[in-house]
Amino acid sequence: MIITSLRSKIRVVFAITLLLLGALFIFSIKYDHAITEERNVAQEQAISHYLYNYYLKYGKIDEAYLEAQNVSLITDKGMVVQIERFFKEKGELKRYAVDTFHLKRIIIINNDRFKLILENKNKPKFPLKRALIFSTVFLLIIVLYLWIMKSLNPLSKLKSQIKTFSQGNLDIECKSDKKDEIAEVANEFDHAVTMIRELLHARQLFLRAIMHELKTPIAKGRLVSEMLVDEKNKARMHSIFERLNLLIDEFAKIEKITSKNFDLTIKPYRMSDLLEASEDMLMIENPKHYITVEVKKDYTLDADFELFTLVIKNLLDNGIKYSTDKHITVVIDNRTLKITNKGEALPEPLENYFKPFHASKRGLGLGLYIVKSILDIHQMELRYTYEDGKNIFTVV
Protein backbone atom coordinates (compact mmCIF):
# COMPACT_ATOMS: atom_id res chain seq x y z
CA MET A 1 0.00 0.00 0.00
CA ILE A 2 1.43 3.36 -1.07
CA ILE A 3 0.91 6.15 1.47
CA THR A 4 0.46 9.51 -0.23
CA SER A 5 -1.49 11.56 2.32
CA LEU A 6 0.61 13.88 4.50
CA ARG A 7 -1.57 13.08 7.51
CA SER A 8 -1.12 9.36 6.90
CA LYS A 9 2.65 9.77 6.70
CA ILE A 10 2.69 11.68 10.00
CA ARG A 11 0.51 8.98 11.60
CA VAL A 12 2.86 6.26 10.35
CA VAL A 13 5.95 8.10 11.67
CA PHE A 14 4.44 8.62 15.12
CA ALA A 15 3.03 5.08 15.23
CA ILE A 16 6.47 3.62 14.44
CA THR A 17 8.03 5.92 17.05
CA LEU A 18 5.57 4.78 19.73
CA LEU A 19 6.04 1.12 18.76
CA LEU A 20 9.82 1.47 19.00
CA LEU A 21 9.48 3.24 22.35
CA GLY A 22 7.21 0.46 23.64
CA ALA A 23 9.57 -2.20 22.32
CA LEU A 24 12.51 -0.47 24.01
CA PHE A 25 10.63 -0.34 27.33
CA ILE A 26 9.70 -4.05 27.13
CA PHE A 27 13.25 -4.95 26.16
CA SER A 28 14.64 -3.02 29.14
CA ILE A 29 12.23 -4.81 31.50
CA LYS A 30 13.19 -8.19 30.10
CA TYR A 31 16.87 -7.26 30.32
CA ASP A 32 16.44 -6.38 34.00
CA HIS A 33 14.66 -9.68 34.58
CA ALA A 34 17.48 -11.55 32.88
CA ILE A 35 20.08 -9.78 35.03
CA THR A 36 18.04 -10.53 38.16
CA GLU A 37 17.68 -14.15 37.08
CA GLU A 38 21.44 -14.51 36.65
CA ARG A 39 21.98 -12.89 40.03
CA ASN A 40 19.45 -15.24 41.66
CA VAL A 41 21.05 -18.32 40.10
CA ALA A 42 24.48 -17.30 41.31
CA GLN A 43 23.09 -16.46 44.76
CA GLU A 44 21.22 -19.78 45.03
CA GLN A 45 24.29 -21.79 44.06
CA ALA A 46 26.36 -19.86 46.58
CA ILE A 47 23.72 -20.52 49.27
CA SER A 48 23.75 -24.25 48.47
CA HIS A 49 27.55 -24.46 48.76
CA TYR A 50 27.58 -22.37 51.96
CA LEU A 51 24.87 -24.46 53.65
CA TYR A 52 26.65 -27.71 52.77
CA ASN A 53 30.00 -26.48 54.10
CA TYR A 54 28.36 -24.97 57.19
CA TYR A 55 26.53 -28.24 57.92
CA LEU A 56 29.75 -30.24 57.60
CA LYS A 57 31.43 -27.90 60.03
CA TYR A 58 28.64 -27.29 62.58
CA GLY A 59 26.10 -30.06 61.86
CA LYS A 60 23.17 -27.67 61.45
CA ILE A 61 21.59 -25.18 59.06
CA ASP A 62 22.51 -21.50 59.38
CA GLU A 63 18.99 -20.04 59.40
CA ALA A 64 20.30 -16.56 60.24
CA TYR A 65 22.28 -16.63 56.99
CA LEU A 66 19.16 -17.67 55.04
CA GLU A 67 17.19 -14.82 56.56
CA ALA A 68 19.98 -12.41 55.67
CA GLN A 69 19.82 -13.66 52.07
CA ASN A 70 16.00 -13.15 52.07
CA VAL A 71 15.50 -16.90 51.75
CA SER A 72 13.08 -18.77 54.01
CA LEU A 73 12.93 -22.45 54.97
CA ILE A 74 9.63 -24.17 54.18
CA THR A 75 8.65 -26.49 57.06
CA ASP A 76 4.90 -26.92 56.46
CA LYS A 77 4.50 -30.66 55.74
CA GLY A 78 1.51 -30.25 53.45
CA MET A 79 3.33 -27.63 51.40
CA VAL A 80 6.45 -29.82 51.32
CA VAL A 81 4.43 -32.76 49.95
CA GLN A 82 2.84 -30.60 47.23
CA ILE A 83 6.20 -29.16 46.21
CA GLU A 84 7.88 -32.59 46.04
CA ARG A 85 4.99 -33.96 43.96
CA PHE A 86 5.28 -30.93 41.61
CA PHE A 87 9.03 -31.38 41.10
CA LYS A 88 8.63 -35.14 40.73
CA GLU A 89 5.99 -34.75 37.99
CA LYS A 90 8.31 -32.38 36.11
CA GLY A 91 11.25 -34.78 36.60
CA GLU A 92 13.21 -32.19 38.57
CA LEU A 93 13.33 -33.91 41.95
CA LYS A 94 17.13 -34.16 42.03
CA ARG A 95 19.98 -33.28 44.36
CA TYR A 96 19.54 -29.64 43.42
CA ALA A 97 16.61 -28.06 41.57
CA VAL A 98 15.02 -24.63 41.17
CA ASP A 99 11.54 -23.89 39.75
CA THR A 100 8.46 -21.71 40.24
CA PHE A 101 5.57 -23.11 42.25
CA HIS A 102 2.45 -21.02 42.85
CA LEU A 103 4.36 -17.88 41.83
CA LYS A 104 7.08 -18.69 44.36
CA ARG A 105 10.69 -19.45 43.50
CA ILE A 106 11.40 -22.80 45.18
CA ILE A 107 14.86 -24.30 45.76
CA ILE A 108 15.30 -28.00 46.60
CA ILE A 109 18.65 -29.07 48.10
CA ASN A 110 18.83 -32.85 48.57
CA ASN A 111 22.28 -34.24 49.37
CA ASP A 112 23.76 -36.96 51.53
CA ARG A 113 23.68 -34.69 54.62
CA PHE A 114 20.28 -32.95 54.57
CA LYS A 115 17.17 -32.21 52.51
CA LEU A 116 15.90 -28.63 52.39
CA ILE A 117 13.06 -26.86 50.56
CA LEU A 118 13.67 -23.11 50.42
CA GLU A 119 11.75 -20.12 49.07
CA ASN A 120 13.81 -17.38 47.45
CA LYS A 121 11.97 -14.13 48.13
CA ASN A 122 14.33 -12.01 46.02
CA LYS A 123 12.14 -10.86 43.14
CA PRO A 124 12.87 -8.23 40.49
CA LYS A 125 11.52 -4.86 41.56
CA PHE A 126 9.26 -2.91 39.26
CA PRO A 127 11.39 -0.21 37.58
CA LEU A 128 9.24 2.73 38.71
CA LYS A 129 11.68 5.44 37.66
CA ARG A 130 12.16 3.93 34.22
CA ALA A 131 8.38 3.53 33.80
CA LEU A 132 7.87 7.18 34.73
CA ILE A 133 10.51 8.27 32.20
CA PHE A 134 9.01 6.15 29.42
CA SER A 135 5.47 7.30 30.29
CA THR A 136 6.58 10.94 30.17
CA VAL A 137 8.24 10.46 26.79
CA PHE A 138 5.17 8.56 25.52
CA LEU A 139 2.81 11.36 26.58
CA LEU A 140 5.16 13.96 25.10
CA ILE A 141 5.08 12.19 21.74
CA ILE A 142 1.27 12.01 21.87
CA VAL A 143 1.07 15.75 22.65
CA LEU A 144 3.47 16.51 19.77
CA TYR A 145 1.35 14.37 17.43
CA LEU A 146 -1.86 16.16 18.42
CA TRP A 147 -0.13 19.53 18.09
CA ILE A 148 1.14 18.76 14.60
CA MET A 149 -2.21 17.33 13.47
CA LYS A 150 -4.00 20.40 14.81
CA SER A 151 -1.60 22.63 12.89
CA LEU A 152 -2.67 20.80 9.71
CA ASN A 153 -6.36 21.62 10.21
CA PRO A 154 -6.05 24.88 8.22
CA LEU A 155 -4.73 22.76 5.34
CA SER A 156 -8.00 20.79 5.29
CA LYS A 157 -9.95 24.04 5.27
CA LEU A 158 -7.78 25.36 2.43
CA LYS A 159 -8.35 22.13 0.48
CA SER A 160 -12.11 22.54 0.93
CA GLN A 161 -11.90 26.15 -0.28
CA ILE A 162 -9.85 25.14 -3.33
CA LYS A 163 -12.40 22.41 -4.15
CA THR A 164 -15.21 24.96 -3.86
CA PHE A 165 -13.24 27.34 -6.10
CA SER A 166 -12.66 24.60 -8.70
CA GLN A 167 -16.43 24.04 -8.86
CA GLY A 168 -16.90 27.64 -9.98
CA ASN A 169 -17.69 29.37 -6.69
CA LEU A 170 -15.47 32.45 -6.59
CA ASP A 171 -17.02 33.88 -3.42
CA ILE A 172 -14.53 32.29 -1.04
CA GLU A 173 -12.12 33.74 1.47
CA CYS A 174 -9.22 31.85 3.03
CA LYS A 175 -7.10 34.53 4.66
CA SER A 176 -5.12 33.53 7.74
CA ASP A 177 -3.56 35.64 10.47
CA LYS A 178 -1.07 32.94 11.43
CA LYS A 179 2.63 33.01 10.54
CA ASP A 180 3.34 29.46 9.37
CA GLU A 181 3.85 28.18 5.83
CA ILE A 182 0.24 26.98 5.50
CA ALA A 183 -0.98 30.49 6.32
CA GLU A 184 1.36 31.91 3.67
CA VAL A 185 -0.04 29.53 1.05
CA ALA A 186 -3.62 30.33 2.12
CA ASN A 187 -3.01 34.08 1.88
CA GLU A 188 -1.38 33.78 -1.55
CA PHE A 189 -4.27 31.62 -2.78
CA ASP A 190 -6.76 34.13 -1.41
CA HIS A 191 -4.93 36.89 -3.29
CA ALA A 192 -5.00 34.80 -6.49
CA VAL A 193 -8.74 34.15 -6.08
CA THR A 194 -9.36 37.86 -5.64
CA MET A 195 -7.38 38.66 -8.81
CA ILE A 196 -9.16 35.95 -10.81
CA ARG A 197 -12.54 37.13 -9.52
CA GLU A 198 -11.77 40.67 -10.61
CA LEU A 199 -10.50 39.54 -14.02
CA LEU A 200 -13.59 37.39 -14.62
CA HIS A 201 -15.85 40.21 -13.54
CA ALA A 202 -14.05 42.61 -15.89
CA ARG A 203 -14.29 40.07 -18.71
CA GLN A 204 -18.00 39.55 -18.11
CA LEU A 205 -18.63 43.30 -18.14
CA PHE A 206 -16.57 43.66 -21.32
CA LEU A 207 -18.36 40.84 -23.15
CA ARG A 208 -21.79 41.96 -22.00
CA ALA A 209 -21.03 45.54 -23.04
CA ILE A 210 -19.94 44.35 -26.51
CA MET A 211 -23.02 42.16 -26.92
CA HIS A 212 -25.26 44.99 -25.78
CA GLU A 213 -23.65 47.37 -28.26
CA LEU A 214 -24.04 44.82 -31.05
CA LYS A 215 -27.71 44.29 -30.26
CA THR A 216 -28.46 47.96 -31.07
CA PRO A 217 -27.20 47.98 -34.71
CA ILE A 218 -28.78 44.59 -35.31
CA ALA A 219 -32.15 45.90 -34.13
CA LYS A 220 -31.74 48.99 -36.33
CA GLY A 221 -30.73 46.81 -39.28
CA ARG A 222 -33.86 44.70 -38.87
CA LEU A 223 -35.98 47.83 -38.84
CA VAL A 224 -34.30 49.15 -41.96
CA SER A 225 -34.70 45.80 -43.72
CA GLU A 226 -38.44 46.10 -43.22
CA MET A 227 -38.39 49.07 -45.60
CA LEU A 228 -37.03 46.98 -48.48
CA VAL A 229 -39.48 46.46 -51.29
CA ASP A 230 -37.97 43.28 -52.65
CA GLU A 231 -39.36 40.46 -50.53
CA LYS A 232 -36.47 38.15 -51.42
CA ASN A 233 -33.87 40.67 -50.22
CA LYS A 234 -36.00 41.42 -47.17
CA ALA A 235 -36.11 37.74 -46.22
CA ARG A 236 -32.37 37.45 -46.82
CA MET A 237 -31.64 40.45 -44.61
CA HIS A 238 -33.95 39.08 -41.93
CA SER A 239 -32.05 35.81 -42.05
CA ILE A 240 -28.70 37.58 -41.73
CA PHE A 241 -29.75 39.69 -38.77
CA GLU A 242 -31.42 36.69 -37.13
CA ARG A 243 -28.17 34.78 -37.59
CA LEU A 244 -26.19 37.62 -35.97
CA ASN A 245 -28.66 37.77 -33.09
CA LEU A 246 -28.37 34.00 -32.60
CA LEU A 247 -24.57 34.23 -32.59
CA ILE A 248 -24.68 36.87 -29.85
CA ASP A 249 -26.95 34.63 -27.78
CA GLU A 250 -24.49 31.77 -28.29
CA PHE A 251 -21.62 33.98 -27.17
CA ALA A 252 -23.63 34.76 -24.03
CA LYS A 253 -24.05 31.03 -23.37
CA ILE A 254 -20.35 30.45 -23.96
CA GLU A 255 -19.49 33.20 -21.50
CA LYS A 256 -21.70 31.58 -18.85
CA ILE A 257 -20.27 28.11 -19.49
CA THR A 258 -16.63 29.17 -19.32
CA SER A 259 -17.26 31.23 -16.16
CA LYS A 260 -19.10 28.29 -14.52
CA ASN A 261 -22.13 30.55 -14.14
CA PHE A 262 -24.75 28.39 -15.80
CA ASP A 263 -27.65 26.60 -14.09
CA LEU A 264 -28.45 23.34 -15.85
CA THR A 265 -32.03 22.37 -16.54
CA ILE A 266 -31.76 18.62 -17.02
CA LYS A 267 -34.80 16.92 -18.57
CA PRO A 268 -35.29 13.80 -20.72
CA TYR A 269 -35.35 14.46 -24.48
CA ARG A 270 -35.37 12.16 -27.48
CA MET A 271 -32.16 12.43 -29.48
CA SER A 272 -34.12 12.88 -32.70
CA ASP A 273 -35.87 15.95 -31.20
CA LEU A 274 -32.55 17.43 -30.07
CA LEU A 275 -31.14 16.87 -33.57
CA GLU A 276 -34.14 18.53 -35.22
CA ALA A 277 -33.83 21.59 -32.95
CA SER A 278 -30.11 21.77 -33.75
CA GLU A 279 -30.85 21.76 -37.48
CA ASP A 280 -33.19 24.72 -36.99
CA MET A 281 -30.39 26.60 -35.21
CA LEU A 282 -28.18 26.27 -38.33
CA MET A 283 -30.56 28.62 -40.15
CA ILE A 284 -29.80 27.17 -43.57
CA GLU A 285 -32.25 26.78 -46.41
CA ASN A 286 -33.25 23.20 -47.20
CA PRO A 287 -31.26 21.39 -44.43
CA LYS A 288 -32.01 18.00 -46.04
CA HIS A 289 -29.80 19.02 -48.94
CA TYR A 290 -26.85 19.19 -46.55
CA ILE A 291 -27.78 16.66 -43.89
CA THR A 292 -28.87 13.03 -44.21
CA VAL A 293 -30.38 11.64 -41.01
CA GLU A 294 -30.59 7.90 -40.24
CA VAL A 295 -32.51 6.99 -37.08
CA LYS A 296 -31.69 3.32 -36.54
CA LYS A 297 -32.64 3.28 -32.87
CA ASP A 298 -33.82 6.46 -31.20
CA TYR A 299 -33.24 6.92 -27.47
CA THR A 300 -33.95 9.30 -24.61
CA LEU A 301 -31.20 11.45 -23.15
CA ASP A 302 -31.13 13.49 -19.92
CA ALA A 303 -29.68 16.84 -20.95
CA ASP A 304 -29.98 20.60 -20.85
CA PHE A 305 -31.91 21.44 -24.03
CA GLU A 306 -30.22 24.76 -24.84
CA LEU A 307 -26.69 23.54 -24.21
CA PHE A 308 -26.95 20.13 -25.84
CA THR A 309 -28.58 21.47 -29.00
CA LEU A 310 -25.65 23.92 -29.15
CA VAL A 311 -23.29 20.91 -29.09
CA ILE A 312 -25.05 19.18 -31.97
CA LYS A 313 -25.39 22.46 -33.88
CA ASN A 314 -21.62 23.10 -33.69
CA LEU A 315 -20.83 19.54 -34.79
CA LEU A 316 -23.23 19.82 -37.72
CA ASP A 317 -21.87 23.23 -38.67
CA ASN A 318 -18.26 22.01 -38.56
CA GLY A 319 -19.18 18.86 -40.49
CA ILE A 320 -20.75 20.84 -43.33
CA LYS A 321 -18.07 23.55 -43.30
CA TYR A 322 -15.10 21.16 -43.55
CA SER A 323 -16.59 18.47 -45.82
CA THR A 324 -15.47 18.29 -49.43
CA ASP A 325 -19.03 17.84 -50.76
CA LYS A 326 -20.80 20.08 -48.22
CA HIS A 327 -22.80 17.12 -46.99
CA ILE A 328 -22.90 15.14 -43.74
CA THR A 329 -24.60 11.98 -42.51
CA VAL A 330 -26.04 11.78 -39.01
CA VAL A 331 -26.78 8.36 -37.49
CA ILE A 332 -28.71 7.83 -34.23
CA ASP A 333 -28.18 4.31 -32.93
CA ASN A 334 -27.48 2.44 -29.70
CA ARG A 335 -27.23 5.51 -27.44
CA THR A 336 -24.71 7.19 -29.74
CA LEU A 337 -24.85 10.07 -32.20
CA LYS A 338 -22.48 9.76 -35.19
CA ILE A 339 -21.74 12.64 -37.56
CA THR A 340 -19.83 11.65 -40.71
CA ASN A 341 -18.44 13.77 -43.54
CA LYS A 342 -16.05 13.29 -46.42
CA GLY A 343 -12.74 15.09 -46.14
CA GLU A 344 -9.16 14.98 -45.02
CA ALA A 345 -8.29 13.50 -41.64
CA LEU A 346 -7.54 15.84 -38.74
CA PRO A 347 -3.81 16.67 -38.90
CA GLU A 348 -3.59 16.85 -35.09
CA PRO A 349 -4.97 14.78 -32.21
CA LEU A 350 -8.57 15.59 -31.31
CA GLU A 351 -7.52 16.90 -27.89
CA ASN A 352 -5.67 19.81 -29.55
CA TYR A 353 -8.91 21.07 -31.10
CA PHE A 354 -10.54 21.26 -27.66
CA LYS A 355 -8.37 24.28 -26.86
CA PRO A 356 -10.02 27.68 -27.31
CA PHE A 357 -9.01 29.72 -30.35
CA HIS A 358 -7.29 26.76 -31.97
CA ALA A 359 -5.76 27.74 -35.31
CA SER A 360 -8.51 27.55 -37.90
CA LYS A 361 -8.77 28.92 -41.44
CA ARG A 362 -12.56 29.15 -41.39
CA GLY A 363 -13.46 30.35 -37.90
CA LEU A 364 -12.33 31.33 -34.43
CA GLY A 365 -11.49 27.77 -33.39
CA LEU A 366 -14.13 27.77 -30.64
CA GLY A 367 -16.52 25.10 -31.99
CA LEU A 368 -14.99 21.98 -30.46
CA TYR A 369 -13.95 23.92 -27.35
CA ILE A 370 -17.62 24.71 -26.74
CA VAL A 371 -18.59 21.11 -27.52
CA LYS A 372 -16.03 19.72 -25.07
CA SER A 373 -17.05 22.16 -22.30
CA ILE A 374 -20.73 21.27 -22.57
CA LEU A 375 -20.13 17.52 -22.88
CA ASP A 376 -17.96 17.64 -19.74
CA ILE A 377 -20.85 19.24 -17.88
CA HIS A 378 -23.10 16.37 -19.05
CA GLN A 379 -20.40 13.79 -18.26
CA MET A 380 -20.21 12.69 -21.90
CA GLU A 381 -17.36 12.49 -24.37
CA LEU A 382 -16.60 13.07 -28.04
CA ARG A 383 -14.66 10.44 -29.99
CA TYR A 384 -13.07 10.74 -33.44
CA THR A 385 -12.11 8.16 -36.05
CA TYR A 386 -11.14 8.35 -39.72
CA GLU A 387 -12.24 5.53 -42.02
CA ASP A 388 -12.39 5.22 -45.81
CA GLY A 389 -11.84 8.95 -46.40
CA LYS A 390 -14.51 9.94 -43.89
CA ASN A 391 -14.30 11.80 -40.57
CA ILE A 392 -16.54 10.26 -37.91
CA PHE A 393 -17.38 12.18 -34.74
CA THR A 394 -19.28 10.18 -32.12
CA VAL A 395 -21.03 11.58 -29.03
CA VAL A 396 -21.05 8.82 -26.39
Image (spheres, rainbow, N blue to C red):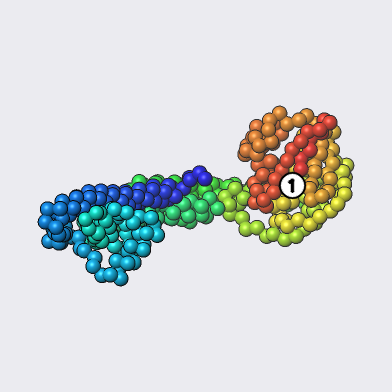
Figure check: 345 above or below 141: above
Judging from the image, what secondary structure is the residue with disc 1 in? loop
Residue 64 x, y percent position in the rendering:
12, 61
Indicate left or right for 246 with 175 as reference.
right
* Residue under the image location 48 percent in, 45 percent down: 4
Q: Nearer the viewer, residue 371 or 63?
A: 63
* Residue under the image location 87 percent in, 46 percent down: 294
Residue 68 x, y percent position in the rendering:
13, 59
Q: Amino acid at mark 1?
A: Val
Indicate left or right for 124 with 5 as reference.
left
* Residue under the image location 22 percent in, 50 percent down: 45
Residue 365 x, y percent position in the rendering:
66, 37
Count of marks, rendered view: 1
Residue 346 x, y percent position in the rendering:
73, 31
State the residue position of label 1. Answer: 396
Figure check: 202 above or below 353: below
Q: Nearer the viewer, residue 387 or 318?
A: 387
**Residue 76 shows in this picture:** yes
Indicate left or right for 167 with 369 as reference.
left
For label 1, the crowd category at 10 Å Cα-Cα, with few meaning under 14, some 14 to 19 and many 20 or more, is some
In which quadrant of the rendered view does residue 268 lie?
Answer: bottom right
Q: Nearer the viewer, residue 162 or 321?
A: 162
Indicate left or right for 320 with 193 as reference.
right
**Residue 36 shows in this picture:** no
